[in-house]
Amino acid sequence: MSSSPPSDGAPHWQRNLYVCLFGSFSTIVAMTLLLPFLPLYVQQLGVTSPKAAVQWSGVAFGATFLAAGLVSPLWGRMADRYGRKLILIRASFGMAVVMSLLGLAQNVWQLVGLRFLAGLVGGYSSGATVMIATQTPRSRTGWALGTLASGVMAGNLVGPLIGGALPPLIGIRNTFFIAGALIFCAFIATTWLVKEKPVERKRAKSGDSTASAAYNTTGNTTGNAADTPAASTTTGWASVPDLRPVLAMLVTAALLMFANMSIEPIITVYVSQLVHDVRHVTLVSGFVMSASALGSVLAASRVGRLADRIGAPKVIVACLAVCAVLLVPQAFVTSGVQLVVLRFLMGLALAGLLPSITSVIRHNVPDRSAGYILGYATSANYAGQVTGPLAGGFVGAHLGMQAVFLITSGLMLGGALFNGWVFRGAASGTGARSPRHH
């Protein structure tokens, strides 16, 4: 194994991991806690019609993801150029300010504009992913990214719960101020505790060639065109020796979020067909929404450790196939409990995908371009988050709710076959890399 820093890891990688874990958790909590009360806040801002309030809530919520998807590659490139810590400081401080300003909004246009601004200046969790992916020893990448992903998923789980509990106690506006203060704590922790080597603006060609030593699909160190002195200054897509696995991971990242989010628009209606007591519909719907996230929180680090041991490509193909299988019985459940259990099991399978996707990209991209390419992976995630609910709602309305599960299952199975084909082709090619170790 190469003795270069990317293989051995940065000296403070474990401390950085735990700081980024806290920062990612706190920022995601702050960004999702408004879900339960967003329509109420829209009504407080002058939108009196319930139907219009729901529509404006959707616009306000989606504005953040739209903006974040647009700028993620930019922030990734800036991280490569100026350092990952600086990007985390910028994101945490900017989000702390914007989150507090949300509590001062006077009309719905200001709310939407501030939510859009939050997406532009945010991106802490994606920046943390880049930092941990590039600082962690290769043999621990899957575990570290899985641990970080569990913090993000826990934030998605806890955020709405806090958002449902705080407003009745302190009011909606004060809830935003509390959220801003929480992110500010992440800003302080990141500023003082995260350590990073200064970015080398001019790299020595011989050093770059050594530090960029590739790992082929058998786990052996090899050289490739991207690691030669002539290519040592190449950045962006041109620096990637084999685009096939990287592009496959972008497609898989979008597919992951698409599959996870496609049932969001139909959950409550679907549950109402399974639960006879209307008073329990929203409660069961909440359990269904949370079950997948809970399963992912519990399994992410463990599946990441498995990916370190057997290889991320195998985990990706297996997780996609398992998700495809689990989606089929969800279309034919006869009780809410059955749906909750199946969503929990699907969360266990989904947990292995995001860390493994990041790991494959990380090990197929040179350090100098990792942030830029991983930024596109983040954009692909957001694309899935946007298109998933839209497609699920359309299919559910025109083809029936069972079709949502069955079509999504087919897409996941297709993704498994596609990835198996890509990794097999990459393994037989030259210069292919795989994050597997012996």
Image: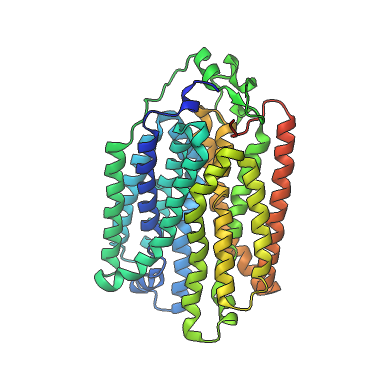
From the top left corner, tell me how far across and down residue 80 is, in percent: 46, 31
Name the image colouring: rainbow
Q: Is residue 65 above or below residue 59?
A: above
Q: How many numbered marks does the figure carry?
A: 0
433 left or right of 367 in image: right
**Which quarter of the image is occupied by the N terminus?**
top right
408 left or right of 1 in image: right
Q: Residue at the location (32% across, 56% down)?
A: 99
Report which quarter residue 273 is drawn in: bottom right
**Which quarter of the image is occupied by the C terminus?**
top right
From the top left corner, tell me how far across and down residue 264 is, in percent: 55, 67
Q: Residue furthest bottom?
A: 277
From the top left corner, tell me how far across and down residue 278 is, in percent: 50, 85
Q: Is residue 396 above or below residue 436?
A: below
From the top left corner, tell me how far across and down residue 112 is, in percent: 41, 60
Q: Residue at the location (59% across, 66% down)?
A: 342
32 left or right of 103 in image: right
The answer to whether residue 123 of the structure is visible from this angle is no
The answer to whether residue 119 of the structure is visible from this angle is yes
Q: Is residue 118 above or below residue 285?
A: above
175 left or right of 137 in image: left
Report which quarter residue 114 is drawn in: bottom left
Q: Residue at the location (57% across, 31% down)?
A: 365
